[in-house]
Image (spheres, helix red, strand yellow):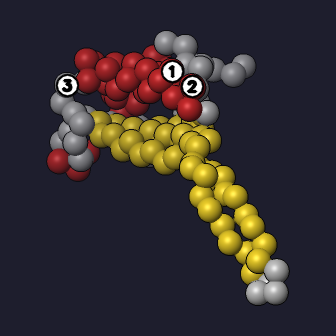
Amino acid sequence: MELQYLTFDFSEADDGSGGFDAMASVPPRALPALEEEIAQVLDWAYAHFPEGPGPLDESFTWDVDLQATSESSTQQRVRYVPGARRFERESMGSETLRHTLTLTLAGNADFCAAFRDAFIRDED
């Protein structure tokens, strides 16, 4: 599958298991497309490896961690108060500027091999 927003870094253990980490930051208008891409990755994992998600040390084949943050900016009207040498601020509302989603998938050797085949392109 071709991914537009997610680029995964892979960390491999000696036994072939490992973890895939991706982070994408997008403006609000692109959030639905990023979420759709993450949904495709997770749907693939659930369909191909139904023995997850869950802790690998409890015999699950894969696990997932998904986190999100939003950055916003608050516009303010500022008024200087002469003589008092201070400023008064009035909030004019806030605007979301950017959403950042972090997706981490960990899996056993079979999961990692299949994930690489499905989502990682060789950069030869």
- Mark 2 residue element: helix
Q: How many marks?
A: 3
Q: Which residue is mark 3?
A: 50
Helix, strand or loop under label 3: loop
Label 1–label 3 contact, CB within 8 A:
no
The residue carrying pointer 1 sits among few (fewer than 14), some (14 to 19) or many (20 or more) residues within 10 Å by Cα, namely: few
Residue type at mark 2?
Answer: Ala
Q: Quadrant of residue 64?
A: top left
The residue under the point 29% across, 36% down is 62
In this rendering, would 112 be left or right of 46?
right
Q: Residues within 10 Å of mark 2 (few under 14, many from 20)?
A: few
Extreme residue toward the top, this view: 1
Q: Residues within 10 Å of mark 3 (few under 14, many from 20)?
A: few
In the shown orientation, is residue 39 left or right of residue 26? left
Label 3 amino acid?
A: Pro
Question: Which residue is identified by label 1?
Answer: 33
* Residue 51 x %, y %: 18, 30
Label 1 or label 3, whichever comes before in sequence order: 1
**Location of residue 15 with respect to 4 vertically, above or below:** below
Q: Tell me where residue 45 appears, x and y as whole percent.
A: 32, 24
Image coordinates for residue 48, horizontal then vertical, percent: 27, 18
| Residue 18 in view, yes or no | no
Question: Which one is in front, 14 or 80?
Answer: 80
Whether tag 2 and tag 1 are in contact, CB under 8 A, the answer is: yes
- Residue marked by disc 2: 30
